[in-house]
Image (spheres, rainbow, N blue to C red):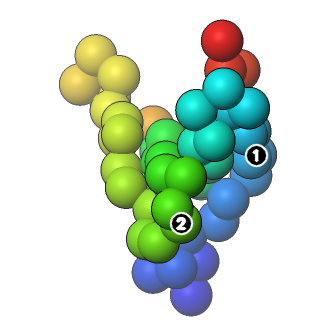
Amino acid sequence: MEPTCGRPLRLKFNNKTCQLYIADAYYGLMLVGPKGGKAKSLVTKAVGVPLRLTNSLDIN
């Protein structure tokens, strides 16, 4: 079930932009905008390698 639905491992909220960033074990880095809705994929690979078990992130 997780590969279908994803598994968010870390959430970070940007107070300046009101955006929610999601580090997901299966889908990489995702973003939900200030109006909500469905999360958008931002990054799924780094240097051609798929992100797996993305369990942390930092927002500047």
What is the x, y in percent for residue 38?
43, 71
Please identify the residue farthest to the top as the structure is shown: 60
Residue located 23% across and 25% down the image: 48
Which of these two is toward me, 51 or 20?
20
**Residue type at numbered disc 1:** Arg
From where the camera sits, is residue 54 visible? no
Looking at the picture, how far across and down is residue 9, in whole percent? 74, 52
* Spatial CA span between label 1 and label 2: 17 Å
In the image, residue 29 sits, relative to residue 36, either above or below, namely above
- SS category of the residue bearing label 1: strand
In the rendered view of the protein, which quadrant contains the N terminus? bottom right
Q: Judge whether 53 appears above or below 16 on screen.
A: below
Q: In the image, what residue occupies the spot 64% across and 65% down?
A: 7
Mark closest to the chain's N terminus, 1 or 2: 1
Q: Nearer the viewer, mark 1 or mark 2?
A: 2
Q: Residues within 10 Å of mark 1 (few under 14, many from 20)?
A: some
Q: Nearer the viewer, residue 13 or 15?
A: 15
| 26 vs 13, nearest the viewer | 13
Residue 10 tag number? 1
Quarter holding the C terminus is top right
Instruction: Name the residue beneath numbered marker 2.
Output: 36
Is 49 positioned to the left or the right of 56 in the image? Answer: left
Q: Is residue 40 above or below residue 21?
A: below
